Amino acid sequence: MSDEITPAAAASQPIAGHMQNESYFQLVWRRFRRSKASLVGGCLVLTLITLAVFADFFCPTSIYHIDLKSTFIPPQRVHFIDKDGQFHLWPFVYNYTYTLNPKTFQVYWAEDESKPYEIKFFVTGSEYKLLGFIPANLHLFGVEEGGTIYLLGTDKMGRDLWGKACEAGRISLTMSLFGTLISIAVGSILGVASGYYGGWIDNVLQRFTEFVAAFPNLPLWMALAALVPKTADSFSVFVIMSCIFALLSWTVLAREVRGKVLAMRSTDFVLAAKEMGASDARIIFRHLYPNTLSHVIVILTLTIPGVILAESFLSFLGIGISEPLISWGLLMRNTQDIQTLGQNSWILSPIAFIVAAVLGFNFLGDGLRDAADPYATM
Amino acid sequence: MLNYLLRRLIIAVFLLIGIGIVSFIVIKLPPGDFASRYRQFLLDRGSPQVEADRAAQMLRERYDLDKPVPVQFFLWVKGMVTEGKFGYSFAYRKDVGELVAERLPKTLLLALLCHFISTVVGVGLGIFVAPRKYGFWDNFWAILAFIFTSVPRFSIAIILLYVLVIKLHQPSISSFFSPEFVIAPWSLERVIDMLRHIWPAVLIAGLGGVARNLRVMRGNLLDVLGAQYVQTARSKGLKERVVIMKHAVPNALHTIVAYQGTVLPYMMQGELEAAIVLGLPTMGPLFYESLVNQDIYISGSLLLMYGALILVGNLLADIFLAVLDPRIRYS
């Protein structure tokens, strides 16, 4: 055996300090993984996105199904033990039938214990278009013909609240993401311009940022949202609302990006690039902006929950989006009427989705903030 | 320092003008002028056309709607400053100034009460958890703080409303006083009665503020507790209580004061959400109603008021900080 190391052997042998050669994303992931809360947040967000994208699959009936004969049915309980006290290995539900109070005409829903309906998984049911174009009719769960399964009850129009809440995530999440992306674009442009060019541009932009930041967000959002004409079509409403949310949320990012760019402007690698005759555009897009990207992503994640909260509040008040678009806040619109709420308390359930989304993004953002700079020691 | 305060004041005036312009744009943005909307409002109510035309014309003259827009803006501002005239509300049939004067004190009372309580409680909890870093109570409050800031406040308001009205049959909701106290002069009973009515709103708006103050105070105090002079104090043999309360806390409080400027808008928005859902007669429900009715002078004026309140709050926080902390640079 000679001491000479062949290239092949060198490749197979672990090199000292190999651990340092992990890529940036590996380092970020390694640090991100350490925090349980951020993993939980990531899972929450992923779950909500999955539920929203495949809402048709997770809802036992069609999500567009309207049945005015089954309005405000309470959540159906999943049973294991039937009325005779016998234990069933497979869960089942009872249908609800209604009785009318002859004096007050109030509707009472009661379980009809004569016929149990077993819950089945991966059943074929109403047809839908998966992702909008793949025809499908498979649903995650359901019951036999003649039975109903409303896990969260039904709303004023007799729609399954569970399916509706899943579907509402589409608008709530995409609108907040879209609005935040616009604000990220605006904030990045203004932040880079402010930090890179400095001088009077910086001064003007900083005063402008200060001015926008001084504005009370919620009242202005409400005022602008109320101005959106009621006759506008769904798509325009969606875009206009997103822009309204973007309008005031870019200031944090602009300041952060400015600070970062300002700090990096006079570092060696930027000076070197300048000496070599790189254009401003090249320096900004190849050298400066990519280095702020980790912070941009963190702020993106932390801006989303604010928009979700604001959007749900506006829709809840009826000045945000309106039918046929549907969001978590809009689903809770009926709870404004204390009488309706008093009799049908389960229509509050979309709150859980909002809380899950806000918590999820907050946890995720916090974890990312700690992980974004993996070279710093903790 | 006087120089610094003066500059802050001048910037604040410019910001206020900017907020005024935006509010005015909100007034002007809907198609058609205010008088034509008022005319439509009267026609919808069944007034004869001649009458509606005449009323609209009167309004146009009174509020100078026939003049160019910059002049209108100037006159609007002038009317507010000199006569307290904010514009006409057709739903209430009086000047918005009167409505604002009616509701502003209540709004301020609620917002300041929330602010004060949440600051005291939040700072207190921060002092409590910081020395117990990663202990049970620290984690417990960290989780609670996360929940407080994540649950939409309007939904806390609905749940509270549901519990109080449907489950507990509480009559003390949606007003500031019980009927027997509405016109009574101020007395201890009246204050207690008021507190019994407004505590849900204070609670709802305050929870998020508590959570935020708690987090900031905890972070600051942990930073300060790591400083060398704290170590010196400890090695002098001072009791841990004295080290924290006498040496660490006063230095951690500065950031809390600076932070109040950020918390204030949050509290105002919380008050807005809570008051709308609970129906308390503050500026919040009036603002919401005006948006739904397109009673645009109310919307614009209240928007201006919200902006101005937050601006003044920020200014006060800055001034207070400058007085409190000699290390602030005035350049």
Image: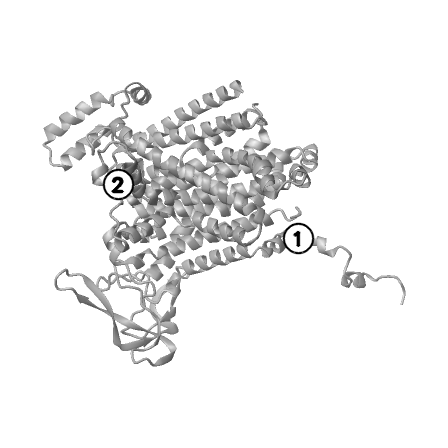
Q: Quadrant of the C terminus of chain B?
A: top right
Q: Secondary structure at mark 1?
A: loop
* Residue placed most toward the observer, A220 or B110: B110
Question: Label 1 crowding class (10 Å Cα cut-off): few <14, some 14-19, many 20+?
Answer: few
- On whether disc 2 and disc 1 are found on a single subunit, the reply is no
Q: Which mark is residue A23?
A: 1
Look at mark 2 in the image and give the residue it sits on. Answer: B175
Q: Which mark is residue B30?
A: none
Q: Residue at x 27, y 53 (%)?
A: B168
x, y percent for residue A323: 29, 51
Quarter assignment of residue A139: bottom left
Q: Secondary structure at mark 2?
A: loop
Q: Quadrant of the N terminus of chain B?
A: top right
* Residue placed most toward the observer, B246 or B312: B246
At label 2, the amino acid type is Ser
Please say if A255 is above or below B204. above
CB atoms of marks 2 and 1 within 8 Å = no
Res. A343 visible in picture: yes
Q: Chain of mark 1?
A: A
Question: Label 2 crowding class (10 Å Cα cut-off): few <14, some 14-19, many 20+?
Answer: some
x, y percent for residue A223: 33, 37
Q: Residue at x 42, y 50 (%)?
A: A174
Please say if A123 is above or below A280. below
Q: Residue at x 40, y 53 (%)?
A: A354
Closer mark to the observer between disc 2 and disc 1? 2
Quarter assignment of residue B15: top left
Q: Residue at x 59, y 39 (%)?
A: B242
* Residue placed most toward the observer, B138 or B26: B138
Q: Is residue B228 left or right of residue B218?
A: right
